[in-house]
Amino acid sequence: MTSKAEVKDGLWETVKTVVYALLIAGIFRTLLFQPFWIPSGSMKDTLLIGDFLFVNKFAYGYSQYSCPFSLCTFIDGRWVSSEPERGDVVVFRHPVNGTDFIKRLIGLPGDRIQMRDGILYLNGEEVQTEPDGTFDEVMAPQGPQRLTPRCANGPVGQGGTCSKEKFIETLPNGVSHSILNIGMGPNDNTPVYTVPEGHYFFMGDNRDNSTDSRVDQLARGVGMVPAENLIGRADRVIFSAAGRSLFFFWTWRADRFFEEIV
């Protein structure tokens, strides 16, 4: 027969186990890796709605936004800071609405950036692009938010093939990545943006479906992102599901499991 003392000791051991597990999870999330689920199509075809990844938090050091709920208010600026590289896919805290965003780092402090007729110019030089066919997907609601894709060949009926022009863009430091084009939009021709010291300029790979640094913060865009807002670098997709829930195993994209992000 189990005594009251044994029951009490068992409950105490369970509580300690839970507390230790929470502490370990908190340290892991704060110092090492933060989970991130892709909710929108702004980074297609590099990242798809439903991709799940872990953000490398020690890649750039730590700021107040490194802790869950921005609790590290005691950190002034960045600790153990490392500079991000042009072309990195970065998770950062949106300077206006406070949510976590993921985009590609295009502009470093001092850079001059402009879009002309959908072509990216860095410091007055046209960035090299090469046609790479099309990115095709089914016209259907995607992810928990049931978002429908935008198409270059629209209008497309439900179940039809939604296509976008695809290009390989090569940045000045040699980083090559895929970008998509839907058509001429309001962010395809811009003024020259000069990135101030201590800030960065981000863009989505799905260029015509991304609210990024091309959109002023007064319009609730990203604008220039302060260095302290960087959370970490996205290096690899861990898991991917195309359906409304990760439990819908028949919608899993097994070919994207552990895929490197470039």
Image (cartoon, rainbow, N blue to C red):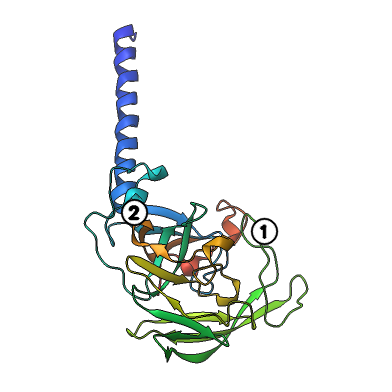
Residue 52, position as x, y percentages in the image: 47, 59
- Left or right, 234 with respect to 9, comes to right
Q: Residues within 10 Å of mark 1 (few under 14, many from 20)?
A: some
At x 27%, y 55%, the residue is: 78
Residue 258 seen anywhere in this rendered image of the structure: no
Q: Label 1 is placed on what type of residue?
A: Arg
Q: Where's the N terminus, which quadrant? A: top left
Residue 194, position as x, y percentages in the image: 41, 76
Distance (Cα) linking label 2 and label 1: 28 Å
Residue 83, position as x, y percentages in the image: 27, 67
- Left or right, 248 with respect to 213, comes to right
User: Mark 2 highlights which residue?
Assistant: 33
At x 58%, y 62%, the residue is: 219
Q: Which dot marks residue 17?
A: none
Q: Residues within 10 Å of mark 2 (few under 14, many from 20)?
A: many
Q: Nearer the viewer, residue 38 or 75?
A: 75
Residue 223 seen anywhere in this rendered image of the structure: yes
Residue 172 drawn above or below residue 139: below
User: Mark 1 highlights which residue?
Assistant: 146
Q: Earlier in the sequence, mark 2 or mark 1?
A: 2
Secondary element under disc 1, as helix, strand or loop, is: loop
Secondary element under disc 2, as helix, strand or loop, is: strand
Residue 114, position as x, y percentages in the image: 48, 82
At x 35%, y 86%, the residue is: 172
At x 56%, y 51%, the residue is: 247
Q: Where's the C terminus, which quadrant? A: bottom left
Q: Nearer the viewer, residue 77 or 39?
A: 77
Specify the quadrant of the image occupied by residue 42. bottom right
Q: Nearer the viewer, residue 134 or 123?
A: 123
Q: Label 2 is placed on what type of residue?
A: Phe
Q: Nearer the viewer, residue 52 or 103?
A: 103
